[in-house]
Every structure is written in structure tokens, then in C-alpha cells.
């Protein structure tokens, strides 16, 4: 019975001696050629860019840069142009130094700007609608005793910075900048949260309420099961304020008045939490750190600066290694170490600073009839609960600092000045060439024969030096008069001339 084989594809076998029919080491991997061509193109592009950069560097190196007029030009000029030019150069040097110093001062002032504290007044009030005491009397003959409407209340939170004349803060905490008012509408947690618009004063722009806080939350002092809508807290969070360094908020986040509406027919206690938004951010200090710095709130940079001033005042730096700090009793209680490295302070202080607690404003939402009606039984304006809080505002000069140091026309002006400097350097180079030609022709006009002889001798020596045919020991005085004189005490008796003559005699004949 013939053997049964499975349907496997059998490979063609070749004799090991049949080397002539071998086609290659194996099949080519797909895509290798395209990858090689791409790598070759990248290498060629890199070489082309390097060559272009080298050419640009050569062109820059060949450009004249000297803007000082050569000495001696004032002796041959007509007028006092050289004196005036040098006076202008001195004024330019002093002006450049003053501008650079002022620019560095502005940058340092921007990085170390001090925030100002101003007073913000916050009004909190609430109105009611469809409360039982506001509805019509029920019909005694009706089967359904429901009014068909739900009792609601609406809380309004409004805040704005007080004017300078209305503030009772110290004069060093006042500032001239006010805040711009813009508001919009929004929804949150299924309940209506609206933002009302107020009139704006274009002559006095002011920062809005939302500018000073990261988030505004309302916590109700009531069990969730007792709430008609099962909501015990409401929160608004500030969205991202666009690119880094800008203070412009989106329209939905730029408001002065925040309102929200909920269902209830009973008085409710709530707490309004305001999380401050400061730049740079302040932190609450631990008791040990607060005892050293004599303050309870400070920024990270302020903490480091305060510790550095304390270390210098107490002379705690080691003599051999200034970066090491010898901790005294207060620093040991803070860091629990005998010595600490100053570069490690930014990391060590993180355990002793924490985020500032939010500002808590308690408020009672009143829905009873006695609160919302006057003595004669008519509805009255709701009474407002007023709070005054201190907020940090920007330095009024920061905007001017930014405008001075980030002027959009500054790069264009620099390019124009650089182009004028290049033209000036070319003109000074032309003046130097003209002075050289003037000196050449002036010397030639005084004694043409001697000038031509010395000039041809100089050209000959230069040519010999270029062709490496000059003799050792023969200097620029080789054609001077002393070489023409002989004698025992002449130049021909010196060691240099003897060595040169010996070398010349030792040369093989051509």
C-alpha cells in the first residue's frame, strides 16, 4: 500500500554542489529601499542646511563691524565732522547703557512685583416665588387641594471692589485700578444659575467678581433627603483663562452677579465658600514657619526670601561651605536637621505650606412672610446681608511694565538699528580706505624716487614671504644702510648674518 502524505507544500531541494544556480543570500525585505532613500534625502537636506548656515556665517564674518573712525582723519578733514561723530558715539554708548539698565530694572520689578490689597463688598439677598403665603386661597369645595405650583427661592450674590474714597484700608493697600464688570448666564446641577449684566463705565474699567476667585460654592445645612431636588451643594468653577500670561476670562466666566434658583418653602441655612485666585499664589504657613517669618500667609518666593534674610541675620552659614546652613533652635524645630543645604529649601518648605482656606460667608435663606412683607402688608425689597472681604489685586504698574518690555514694534526697531549699524560700518571702512590712499599718495608726492624704491622693496619682501623664498635672519632692515657698510663692528659680523650666509652656502646648486 503506497504511503499517504499530507498536502504539505514541499520545497524544491538543490544539490549543495550546484553553486552556479544560486541567485543570492535570500529574498529582499519589502520597504528597505524606500527607507534607505528617505534616509539619504534627510542626510542631503541636513548637509544642504549646514552648507547654507556655513555660508551665512562666512558672510556675517566678512561684514565690517568697526564703527570707530581711524585716528588721523581729523587732521586731513575739512570741518569738525569727526569730532561731532565721536561725540554722537559717546552719547549712543551712554544711552545704550541707560536703556539696558532700565530694561533690567523693569524686568526685575515685574518678577518681584508686590500685590496690593483692596476691599471687596459682597451683597447677598434672596427673593421668593409661589410660596404658600403668596398663593391664592384654596377652594374648600375642590377635591384637589394642590395649588399646582412649586415654591421656589432665588439667591443673588453680588460683589464689586469699593472705590478708593469708600475704602477704610491703609494707604499702602490702596490702588488706582478698578475692576471691569461683565456677566452672562449659565446652568449648573439641573438648577438655574443665572448671571445678570450691569452697566459698565468705559472710562473706569474694573475687574469682575469672578476674576478674584477660582470657585464659588454654596453648601446647604440640610440633609439631602430633605431637599426637594436632592442637592446639598452648588459649585461654580472658573474655566481656563486662555494663553499663559493673559488675564482675559471667557465671557461666561466674567461676571459680577451670581444667582441661583431652587425649590423650597422652608428657611435654610447655607455657607458660601469663596476660593481665592491669586498670582502668585499665597499659602498658609505652619506654626513653626509662621513664628520664624512673623506672618501666617505668604507666597513660596516670599517664604524663601524670608528664610534667607533670617539665615543672614543670624549668621547661620558655614564658613567652609556657604551653601550649608547650621540650623539654630527654630530651624531645627522646623526641619528636624542639624544642617541643611540651601538648594534643598524649596523642597523642604513644601511640608510646611498649605492652600489657603476658602472665605466662608454664612447666610440664611428666608422664605417666610414676615421677612418679605412690610408692616402694612405689602411686599418689600429683600434685606441684604453685606460682607467686606480683602482681595489681592495686581500692581497698577504691571500693565505698563508689560507694555514697555513686550512692545510689538521692538523687534522691527532692532532690525532697523542693525541695518543702520551695518551701513555705518561700511562707511567707516570706506573712510579708512580713503585715509590709506591719502597717506600713500601724500608720501609719494614728497619724495617719489625714495617712495617707489621702498615700495618696490616692500612688495618684493612680501612676495618672497608668500613664496617661502626669504632667507633666515634677513629682516625688514635687510636693505637698510647698515647692511651696505662693512667693518668689524658692522652688521655682517653678527651671528645672525653668519648663520644666514652658512645656510646659503650649504644649499645645493640649482
Image (cartoon, helix red, strand yellow):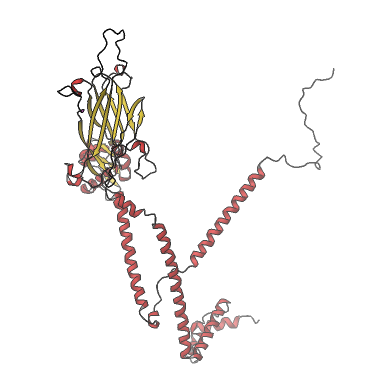
Q: Is residue 95 above or below residue 343?
A: below
Q: Position of residue 401 (x, y in %)?
A: 31, 52
Residue 344 falls left or right of residue 13: left
- Whether residue 288 is in magenta: the answer is no
Q: Which quadrant of the structure image shows residue 378?
A: top left
Q: Which quadrant of the structure image shows residue 325?
A: top left
Q: Position of residue 335 (x, y in %)?
A: 27, 38
Residue 334 falls left or right of residue 478: left
Q: Residue at x 30, y 48 (%)?
A: 323
Q: Residue at x 42, y 63 (%)?
A: 416
Nearest to the observer: residue 390 or residue 454: 390
Q: Is residue 352 above or below residue 378?
A: below
Q: Is residue 238 above or below residue 141?
A: below
Q: Position of residue 101 (x, y in %)?
A: 31, 59
The magenta region covers 378-383
Q: Quadrant of the C terminus?
A: bottom right
- Whether residue 381 is in magenta: the answer is yes
Amino acid at each position: 500500500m503506497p504511503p499517504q502524505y499530507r498536502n504539505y507544500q514541499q520545497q524544491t531541494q538543490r544539490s549543495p554542489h550546484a553553486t552556479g544556480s544560486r541567485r543570492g543570500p535570500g529574498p529582499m525585505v519589502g520597504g528597505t529601499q524606500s527607507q534607505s532613500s528617505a534616509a539619504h534625502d534627510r542626510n542631503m537636506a541636513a548637509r544642504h542646511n549646514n552648507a547654507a548656515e556655513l555660508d551665512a556665517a562666512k558672510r556675517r564674518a566678512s561684514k565690517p563691524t568697526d564703527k570707530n573712525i581711524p585716528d588721523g582723519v581729523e587732521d586731513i578733514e575739512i570741518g569738525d565732522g569727526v569730532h561731532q561723530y565721536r561725540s554722537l558715539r559717546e552719547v549712543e554708548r551712554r544711552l545704550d547703557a541707560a536703556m539696558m539698565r532700565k530694561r533690567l530694572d523693569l524686568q526685575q520689578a515685574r518678577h518681584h512685583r508686590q500685590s496690593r490689597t483692596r476691599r471687596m463688598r459682597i451683597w447677598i439677598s434672596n427673593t421668593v416665588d409661589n410660596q404658600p403665603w403668596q398663593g391664592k386661597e384654596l377652594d374648600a369645595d375642590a377635591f384637589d387641594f394642590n395649588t399646582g405650583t412649586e415654591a421656589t427661592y432665588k439667591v443673588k450674590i453680588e460683589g464689586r471692589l469699593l472705590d478708593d474714597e469708600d475704602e477704610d484700608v491703609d494707604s499702602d493697600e490702596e490702588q488706582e485700578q478698578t475692576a471691569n464688570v461683565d456677566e452672562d448666564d449659565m446652568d449648573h446641577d439641573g438648577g438655574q444659575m443665572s448671571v445678570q449684566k450691569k452697566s459698565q463705565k468705559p472710562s473706569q474699567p474694573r475687574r469682575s467678581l469672578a476674576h478674584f476667585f477660582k470657585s464659588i460654592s454654596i453648601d446647604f445645612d440640610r440633609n439631602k433627603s430633605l431637599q426637594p431636588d436632592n442637592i446639598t451643594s452648588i459649585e461654580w468653577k472658573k474655566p481656563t483663562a486662555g494663553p499663559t500670561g493673559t488675564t482675559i476670562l471667557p465671557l461666561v466666566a466674567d461676571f459680577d452677579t451670581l444667582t441661583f434658583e431652587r425649590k423650597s418653602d422652608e428657611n435654610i441655612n447655607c455657607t458660601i465658600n469663596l476660593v481665592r485666585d491669586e498670582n502668585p499664589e499665597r499659602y498658609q504657613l505652619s506654626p513653626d514657619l509662621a513664628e520664624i517669618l512673623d506672618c501666617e500667609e505668604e507666597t513660596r518666593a516670599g517664604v524663601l526670601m524670608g528664610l534667607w534674610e533670617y539665615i543672614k541675620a543670624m549668621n547661620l552659614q558655614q564658613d567652609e561651605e556657604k551653601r550649608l546652613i547650621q540650623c539654630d533652635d527654630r530651624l531645627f524645630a522646623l526641619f528636624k536637621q542639624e544642617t541643611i543645604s540651601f538648594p534643598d529649601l524649596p523642597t523642604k518648605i513644601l511640608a510646611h505650606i498649605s492652600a489657603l482656606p476658602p472665605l466662608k460667608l454664612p447666610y440664611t435663606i428666608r422664605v417666610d412672610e414676615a421677612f418679605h412683607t412690610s408692616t402694612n402688608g405689602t411686599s418689600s425689597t429683600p434685606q441684604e446681608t453685606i460682607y467686606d472681604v480683602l482681595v489681592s489685586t495686581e500692581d497698577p504698574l504691571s500693565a505698563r511694565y508689560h507694555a514697555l518690555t513686550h512692545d510689538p514694534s521692538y523687534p522691527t526697531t532692532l532690525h532697523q538699528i542693525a541695518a543702520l549699524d551695518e551701513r555705518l560700518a561700511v562707511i567707516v571702512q570706506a573712510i579708512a580706505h580713503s585715509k590709506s590712499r591719502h597717506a600713500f599718495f601724500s608720501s609719494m608726492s614728497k619724495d617719489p624716487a625714495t617712495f617707489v624704491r621702498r615700495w618696490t622693496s616692500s612688495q618684493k619682501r612680501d612676495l618672497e614671504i608668500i613664496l617661502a623664498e626669504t632667507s633666515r635672519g634677513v629682516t625688514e632692515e635687510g636693505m637698510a644702510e647698515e647692511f651696505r657698510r662693512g667693518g668689524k663692528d658692522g652688521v655682517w659680523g653678527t651671528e645672525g648674518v653668519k648663520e644666514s650666509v652658512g645656510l646659503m652656502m650649504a644649499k645645493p646648486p640649482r
